[in-house]
Image (cartoon, helix red, strand yellow):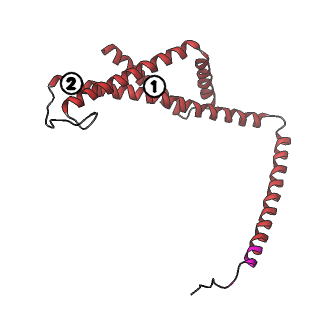
Amino acid sequence: MSIQLSLVFGAMVIQMITLLVLLLPLPYPVRAKIIDFTFVLQKSQNFKVGVIFAVLLLILQFLDCVNRLKKIGDYSGSPYFTTGVATETNRTLSYDQLATKFYSQRNLYLSGAVLYLMVAIGTVITIVRKLVKKETEYRTLLSSEDNEGEVEKYKQLIKLKEKDIATFKKQLSGLQTAYNDLTPTGGVKKDE
């Protein structure tokens, strides 16, 4: 059991370091290399099988810890994890049962943290991929030789949109005045 928990704790430490590296404000070339590495890992069939196997084992460990805590809660009459009405409210746990409860809680927290960090790493990698993609597009736009033509094209589009906005503002003010002319200026008469 200690080898298994050592592996779980090691996985959690590796995940925390990975998350830290992903969240650091690294320069663009380093982030691009990291994203390329994640694409390689994502395409690797062995990596996929290993991750699925690890996730299934962690889920099983998590559920086992919940069941053990439920059994201890049923025995002690605890309001947590009870399935029915306790007949005696003042039951005490032996030291062995307290140790089992402690180890089950520890294992529950460790396996839950590892599962949560897997989801967090996946989310952060997706965000970093989008960031690298946008930065790549920005760098290619800056380095392209057709930069001046593109800038002029976008300036023309901006001018057209500004004209459309001015037209819509005029239409809005005309509609507002027409609406104001249709509404009665006096108050609404109450029927008595």
Label 1: which residue? 15
Q: CA distance from mark 1 to mark 2?
A: 28 Å
The disc label shown at residue 105, or none: none
Q: Is residue 101 left or right of residue 177?
A: left
Q: Amino acid at mark 1?
A: Gln
Closer to us: 59 or 121 = 59
On screen, residue 182 above or below 148: below
Q: From the image, tell me which residue sits under label 2.
A: 99
Label 2's element? helix
Where does residue 143 sit, x and y in percent of width and height? 77, 34
Q: Residue furthest top?
A: 46
- What residue is at 63 percent from the left and 22 percent from the top? 36
Residue 172, how many percent across, how many down?
Answer: 76, 67
Task: Name the image quarter holding the N terminus.
Answer: top left
Residue 183 shown in magenta: yes
Type of residue at label 2? Ala
Span of residues in magenta: 178-186
Asked if residue 145 is among those painted magenta in the image, a careful observer would answer no
Q: Nearer the viewer, residue 141 or 38?
A: 38
The reply, left or right, for residue 103 in relation to residue 21 is: left
Quarter of the image containing the C terminus? bottom right
- Which quarter of the picture shows residue 96? top left
**What is the crowding at mark 1: few (fewer than 14 residues within 10 Å), some, or many (at least 20)?**
some
Classify residue 74 by image quadrant.
Answer: top left
The local secondary structure at tag 1 comes to helix
The image quadrant of residue 129 is: top right
